[in-house]
Amino acid sequence: MTENQTVPAAGGTGTNVIWALLRLAMGWTFFWAFLDKLFGLGFASCVDKKTAQYLGILCDKGTWLTGGSPTMGFLKFSSKGPFAGFFQGLAGNAAVDWLFMLGLALIGLALLLGIGVRIAGYSGALMLVLMYTAGFIPPANNPFLDEHILNAIICIGLVRSRSGQYWGLGGWWSGTSLVRRFPILE
């Protein structure tokens, strides 16, 4: 079977439900990270939670909307290992910020809607592996495996299982002339 051919669903209804739930969970994970960094909702975005004064929820500084960099904190201060210098050099770069935020938003929306799951799954896996490489933080309880690697494997599984076909718009999307012409968009 070639890459352009569609594969049958990964299994019975129970398996489809599991892959649909994993797709929705991964989609929300990416999209939530986008929203948090965009609006400063006080989870991973605010350095000082005392700054959460705008409407009692939103941070008044450090968000992408107020001129903060969504990549600065992680890339500048959490990068470790042999690639630290490379990733620290990318911290705060406007192009990197835009690519990161667009990636979070588009991967999240695609997975939530079940359309473009092939590109979103592969892109999400790449983003997670890059984050693992940047942080190069060996997990405390395992010498290699952490949630970035597990989530990257799940993203590949979302592609291979055709998870957008169940509880998503993937069935309709796959039937469009655009996707039939360019199957990578499935």
Image (spheres, rainbow, N blue to C red):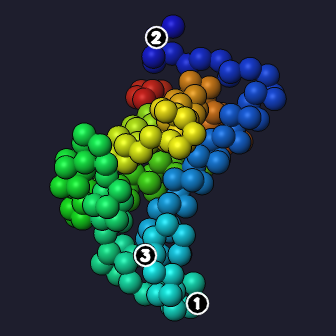
Which residue is located at x 40 percent, y 38 percent?
129
Q: Position of residue 56 (x, y in %)?
A: 58, 90
* Residue 42 in the image: above or below residue 140: below
Q: Earlier in the sequence, mark 1 or mark 3?
A: 3
Lateral position of residue 107 relative to residue 7, left or right: left
Label 3 belongs to which residue? 47
Quarter of the figure with residue 3: top left
Which residue is located at x 46 percent, y 11 percent?
2
Separation of marks 3 and 2 at Cα, in angstroms: 48 Å
Quarter of the figure with residue 77: bottom left
Mark 1 or 3: in front is: 3
Q: Of helix, strand and loop, which one carries label 3?
A: loop
Quarter of the figure with residue 15: top right
Separation of marks 1 and 2 at Cα, in angstroms: 53 Å
Determine the residue located farthest toward the top in the rendered image: 1
Q: Earlier in the sequence, mark 3 or mark 2?
A: 2
Separation of marks 1 and 3 at Cα, in angstroms: 16 Å
Q: Of helix, strand and loop, which one carries label 2?
A: loop
Lateral position of residue 75 relative to residue 105, left or right: left
Q: Give the residue type at disc 2.
A: Thr
Q: Give the residue type at disc 3.
A: Val
Label 2 belongs to which residue? 2
Mark 3 or 2: in front is: 3
Q: Position of residue 74 (x, y in %)?
A: 36, 59
Compare residues 159 and 150 and report the one nearer the observer: 150
